[in-house]
Image (tube, grey):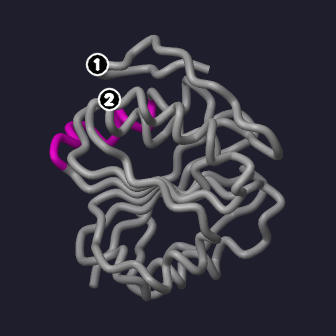
Amino acid sequence: MRITGGYLSGRAVQCPPGEIRPAMDRMRESLFAILGDISGARFLDLFSGSGVVALEACSRGAGTVTAVERDSRKRAVLQANLALCEEAVEVIIAPVERYLLRAREAFEYVFCDPPFRYRYKVDLLQRLARSKACSTGTMVLLHHPRVEPLPAGVEALVRTREQLYGGSQVTFYRDES
């Protein structure tokens, strides 16, 4: 697994122990091309795993990056991977749901990559919409199985795009509050 763009392009990323399904290189490259210039943006990576998406955001100029991962067994590898960034990346080891309850700042971009068997994706979107992690204009990207469609809107989050990647897709929502 390698970083696909920015100043860290081509750098290898370690895979942590436990369950992990890293975001495909092609998908990450496509997503960041769709997002365009994220220079200076606040970026939140939920269900971070290896931290590869947080690394992509750093590498492409995000100003503040926060990575949230529940599994404490992934901490050492996640922190080692994120040490590649010139900027400090905040690593939080906690359930995503708990983090969203306690979030104190809004992000311009929130990437969510829960395990495909995670059955609470709509609930996750509701929690995001109610969280201080989202504010007007926040872009939420949720990676999920292609066979599992998501609603056109959840509270203030309105679907703006769906991008297919093999058996998965990323659904884009914008906070319209």
* Secondary element type, mark 2: helix
Crowd tier of the residue under label 2, counting other residues whose Cα lies within 10 Å: few below 14, some 14–19, many 20 or above:
many
- Look at the image and tell me in which quarter the C terminus lies: bottom left
Residue under the point 72% across and 50% down: 146
Residue at horizontal 49 percent and vertical 86 percent from the top: 101
Say which residue label 2 marks. 59
Residue 78, percent from left and from top: 58, 41
Q: Where is residue 93? Give x, y as percent.
A: 59, 62
Q: Is residue 96 above or below residue 162?
A: below
Seen as rendered, the residue at the extreme top is 10
In the figure, 91 relative to 158: above or below?
above
The image quarter containing residue 38 is top left
Q: Please state the horizontal and vertical placement of residue 155, each as a whole percent of the image.
A: 45, 87
Using the image as rendered, state which of residue 15 and residue 145 is in the foreground.
15
Residue 7: which disc? Answer: 1
The magenta segment is 30-40
Q: CA distance from mark 2 to mark 1?
A: 5 Å
Q: Is residue 135 left or right of residue 164?
A: left
CB atoms of marks 2 and 1 within 8 Å: yes
Q: Is residue 121 above or below residue 19?
A: below
